[in-house]
């Protein structure tokens, strides 16, 4: 339930409601807005009788939210959330960001070379997996803690914030020491203990859509993180499973404007995992930005043919440079309309 206050409601009115909601056995969370304050009622598992609340001073109306998510919804928080990743703003009217880097950190030379190159081309953040969620156990699983150390070296050399995946609740503390933005991969979108754990830290989280997750399940997963107190969440569409096999996944681009209607959280798009094909990455990155994405995340490798994972979808250095030039022109145009 959401209690919308009159624009001239006083702090005393708000405090009185917070107290009464607590007496009813629920938690009240005031959400200040530019026009008026709303108060979210959390902890109820069914319909809450609003008769008593509607009579209180300062209350304009009550909205009953029947969706499995509240804190992430626009009803609760009409203004766009802007996530600050080590000084880089994502969301709202900020310029769309580009996150570039290899699927996995493979060596110091590979990650530092890539970091310096993507930075030179104008990327805003460096990605690279240290803990890799691989389909089979006999493939490269990532350099783990050593990979995090190499990311720190590359981050320092390039000045770029680091985006890297965390796969287990036990590793959240360790990954958070190195990452500026902690990624939850598609396969872990509904790892609820992991979601709760990243909800308890004070670093931003990039939550990727599960490969068979509906929009409602995706937002409900983000709700777990916000419910623990971490509001700094960026959503990421990375393609979903459909009957189509010509591409690795099917990029659901309509989710971008849809999420903007349903939620205040920023949304980025990963055209690399969505398509699985190098030649399709730049066109779909540009399409994502036209659809209103707050950024794109793409895989880049100095020698994709030698990559230990996801080589076929990784951009070459010249390919990344070309895409960045096109994105520069496109974002200038998009900001002018
Ligand atoms: C990745 O970003 O390297 C990755 C494994 O992505 P996803 O979880 O979307 O498959
Ligand atoms: Mn990958």
Image: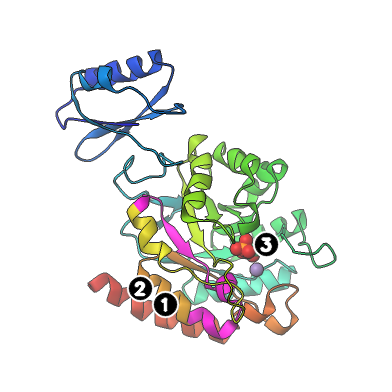
Q: Is mark 1 within 8 Å of ligand 1?
A: no
Percent across and percent down for residue 326 are 41, 82
Tell me the element at label 1: helix
Percent across and percent down for residue 24 are 39, 15
Tell me the element at label 3: loop
Percent across and percent down for residue 15 are 29, 18
Extent of the magenta region: 262-282
User: Pointer 1: residues within 10 angstroms few (<14), some, or many (20+)?
Assistant: some
Horizontal side, residue 61 vs residue 215: left or right: left
Q: Residue furthest top?
A: 23
Distance, label 1 to label 2, CA atoms, is 6 Å
Residue position marked by numbered label 1 in the rendering: 286
Q: Nearer the viewer, residue 29 or 93?
A: 29
Horizontal side, residue 38 vs residue 102: left or right: left
* Residue 129 circle label: 3
Q: Nearer the viewer, residue 73 or 51?
A: 51
Residue 45 seen by the camera: yes
Is tag 2's residue or tag 3's residue first in the polypeptide sequence? 3
Q: Is mark 3 within 8 Å of ligand 1?
A: yes
Distance, label 2 to label 3, CA atoms, is 28 Å
State which mark lies toward you, 2 or 3.
Answer: 2
* Residue 290 circle label: 2
Q: Is residue 164 above or below residue 223?
A: below
Image quadrant containing the C terminus: bottom left
User: Mark 2–mark 3 contact, CB under 8 Å?
Assistant: no
User: Pointer 2: residues within 10 angstroms few (<14), some, or many (20+)?
Assistant: some
């Amino acid at each position: 339930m959401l209690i919308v206050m009159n624009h001239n409601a006083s702090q005393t009115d708000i405090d009185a409601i917070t107290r009464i909601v607590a007496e009813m056995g629920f938690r009240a969370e005031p959400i200040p807005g530019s026009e008026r304050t709303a108060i979210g009622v959390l902890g109820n598992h069914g319909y809450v009788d609003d008769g008593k609340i509607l009579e209180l001073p300062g209350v304009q109306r009550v909205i009953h939210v029947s969706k499995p998510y509240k804190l992430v919804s626009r009803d609760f928080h009409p203004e766009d959330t802007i996530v600050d990743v080590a000084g880089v703003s994502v969301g709202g009217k900020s310029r769309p960001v580009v996150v570039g880097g290899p699927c996995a950190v493979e060596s110091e030379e590979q990650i530092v070379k890539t970091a310096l190159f993507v930075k030179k081309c104008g990327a805003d953040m460096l990605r690279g997996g240290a803990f890799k969620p691989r389909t089979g156990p006999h493939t490269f699983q990532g350099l783990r803690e050593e990979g995090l150390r190499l990311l720190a070296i590359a981050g320092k050399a390039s000045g770029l914030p680091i985006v890297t995946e965390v796969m287990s609740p036990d590793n959240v503390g360790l990954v958070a020491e190195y990452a500026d933005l902690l990624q939850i991969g598609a396969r872990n979108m509904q790892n609820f203990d992991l979601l709760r754990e990243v909800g308890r830290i004070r670093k931003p989280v990039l939550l990727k859509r599960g490969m068979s997750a509906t929009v409602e399940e995706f937002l409900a997963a983000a709700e777990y993180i916000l419910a623990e107190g971490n509001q700094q969440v960026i959503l990421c569409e990375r393609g979903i499973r459909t009957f189509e096999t010509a591409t690795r996944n099917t990029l659901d681009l309509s989710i971008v404007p849809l999420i903007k209607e349903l939620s205040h959280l920023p949304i980025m798009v990963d055209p690399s995992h969505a398509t699985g094909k190098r030649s399709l990455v730049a066109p779909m990155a540009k399409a994502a930005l036209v659809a209103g994405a707050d950024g794109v995340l793409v895989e880049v490798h100095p020698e994709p043919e030698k990559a230990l994972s996801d080589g076929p979808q990784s951009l070459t250095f010249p390919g990344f440079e070309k895409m960045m030039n096109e994105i520069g022109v496109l974002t200038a145009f998009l900001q002018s309309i």
